[in-house]
Every structure is written in structure tokens, then in C-alpha cells.
Image (tube, rainbow, N blue to C red):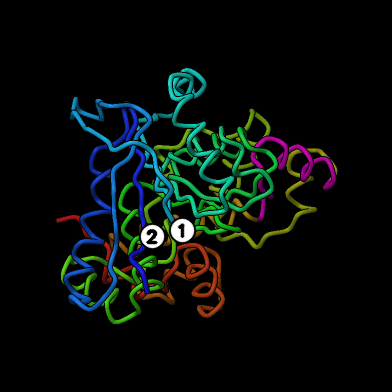
Amino acid sequence: MSALRVGVLAYPGCFASEVFGVPDLLTMAAHVAGPDHAGYDVTVVSPRRRVVASGGTRLSGAPLREVDVLVVPGFELLPGLDVDAELKPLAPEIAAIRAHAATGNAVVSICVGAFLLAEAGLLHGRRATTAWLLADDLARRCPDAEIRPEHLVVTDTGVTTTAAFSAMYDFTLDLIRRHSGPRVARTTARVALLDDARSSQTPYVDPRLLPPPGDEFSRKVMRWLDQHLTTPYNLSALAAEFNVSTRTLLRRFSAETHQTPLQYLQSARVRRARHLLETTTKTVTAISAAVGYRDPSTFTTLFTKHTGHPPTTHRTTSPHPS
């Protein structure tokens, strides 16, 4: 087996830690694998001779070359920023991404590096993810892509996208697992103190940081659902509450929030349950009842689907206020 050629694309404003995080973990994996393993040939590449990354960090990249995997780091992109203005100066990098993808070799984005892949036309018709805080922005920008904001890593026909920042390690451990085997990946994770069993970014979502979705109608519906978490869901009764037909309710709510009232209610119940798990000593059965589920197993299934782990695990792994 030959060394896997990995190129990390450095560009103005990229996160310097995401430029070096992947190579550093691959270096550790090579040490774990031992001298007889082909290992990794990792290079920081750029169409520019010099790059000023985040925080004023100055980087020198090697010229672009053919690699097996091209990794595109993220950059500082806050909700509300003009994405077009941020991407316009990066035309050489976007062209390089497009040219690399045309060779049929793998391309990977870290965090909001997905926006560069989108600009290069690589997300068309594909499943993808990005940082949960900006997933809606990516979905609006790429209406023909299927954005999966709950996933940490999504691979679709040669294009891989990841969630925010530390998800670069989830991707890299998976790369190590496929190239060097599960033992090397597992040991590397232990040495680096990384969680190699994460599957979802949902547990990290803080709704308070998200812009309020929808217009006034959907906000009223959401407010009512928030105030009636324990009320059994009844679409007809909910529509009557707002003097509209069920069809109108579903159409308007979906158009404004991109989800159904039931999906919102389930998310609201899970958010409330997470709060109770983190701040009280109530049993899972009691919390299940407190958020509208008489059957704890139904509640546990829903909670696990939304967060990636069961309520008992959430309680033991989440920080508790002192």
C-alpha cells in the first residue's frame, strides 16, 4: 500500500488550526501504525505563495499538486455576514477545488469550508452537512442539496463535508480507520484524547444562538406548542386554535420554518428534557411524563434520535451547573 497523499488547502482567512489539525492527527496515526505502514504524505497547498490565516497567522503553502484527498478548512463566518463578499476574493481557491474534483479524487470540507465547495458546484444534488449554526444558510444557498445538520460527517460520491471545528477529528479518525485500520484509529483516538464514537452534532445545538425562524404566524404556533408540551399532539385541534384549516396550517408553518408542527414539538420536548436531565435529579420516567410522553421507551427512542444517545448517557456526560 502506498502513502495516502493528502493536501490541505490554505487560503486567506482560513482557520489555521484546521489547516494543521488534520496533518497533526495523521502524523500521530503514522507513529501508532509503525514504520512498516505506508502512512500519509501530507502537504499544505495553496494557489498563493503566502497566506494570512485567522488571527494573522502567516502560512507558506506548497504549489497545488495532485493529491488523493484535498481538505478545505473553514473560515470565520458568522450568521448575517455577506457570504458572497467573503467568497469573492477566494476565486483562485474555488477554481482549485473545482479542478481537483474534476480528477475524481476525494474532496473534504471542514466546517463552513462547505460554502467553498458549494461555490465550486460540488454540492449540487448531494447530501452534505456543515456547522449547525450555519446549516440553514447553506441550505438556502444550495436548494438542490440535501443538508443534514444533525450529522458530524457526510460523504456523498467522493465529496465529504463535516460539522464545525472539532469535527475535523471525526473525519480524520474515519480516514485513518479506512486507510490504516480500526486498531490504529482507535489507538490514535486514545492517545489524542478524542471521542471516536460521536455520531451527531445535535447534542451541541443551542437554540438560543439561532436566529428566530419563521414569520409571525409560525412564531405564534411555536409559542403555543412550547406552552403545551404535555398536551397530546392533535393537528386538527391545533389548526382550530389558530382558526385555519389543517392544510393551511401545515403549508404556512412548513414554508416559514422548513419543518412540520410535530417536528417542532418533538424538538421542543427534547430541548426541555435535556434541560431537566442537566439541572435536576428527576428520573427518566418522570422527565418523560413532564414533556408529554407516558411511555418512557417512546421518549427514549425520540431523545436518542435527536441527540445521538439515550437520556441516561446525556445525563452522565453533560456538564452540570455547580
Image-quadrant location for residue 111: top left
Q: In the displayed structure, would residue 220 be above or below residue 176?
A: above
Residue in the picture at 64% in, 39% down: 257
Nearest the viewer among 88 and 240 is 88
Helix, strand or loop for disc 2:
helix
Q: Amino acid at mark 1?
A: Val
Q: Earlier in the sequence, mark 2 or mark 1?
A: 1
Question: Which stretch is magenta?
Answer: 246-262
Image-quadrant location for residue 25: bottom left
Q: In the rendering, at what x and y percent does residue 57 appear?
A: 18, 29
Q: Quadrant of the C terminus?
A: bottom left
Nearest the viewer among 30 and 74 is 30
Nearest the viewer among 67 and 298 is 67
Q: In the rendering, at what x and y percent does residue 245 appear?
A: 85, 43
Query: Disc 2 designates what residue?
Result: 171
Residue in the picture at 77% in, 42% down: 249
Q: Quadrant of the N terminus?
A: bottom left
Position of 222 with respect to 28 (left or right) is right
Query: Is residue 141 magenta-colored?
Result: no
Residue in the picture at 59% in, 45% down: 102
Q: In the rendering, at what x and y percent does residue 85 appear?
A: 47, 17
Q: In the displayed structure, would residue 231 be above or below residue 62?
A: below
Q: In the displayed structure, would residue 237 be above or below residue 60?
A: below
Dot 2: within a 10 Å radius of its alpha carbon, few (fewer than 14), some, or many (20 or more) residues? many
Give residue 253's mark. none
Position of 176 with respect to 134 (left or right) is left
Query: Disc 1 designates what residue?
Result: 153
In contact (CB < 8 Å): disc 2 and disc 1: yes
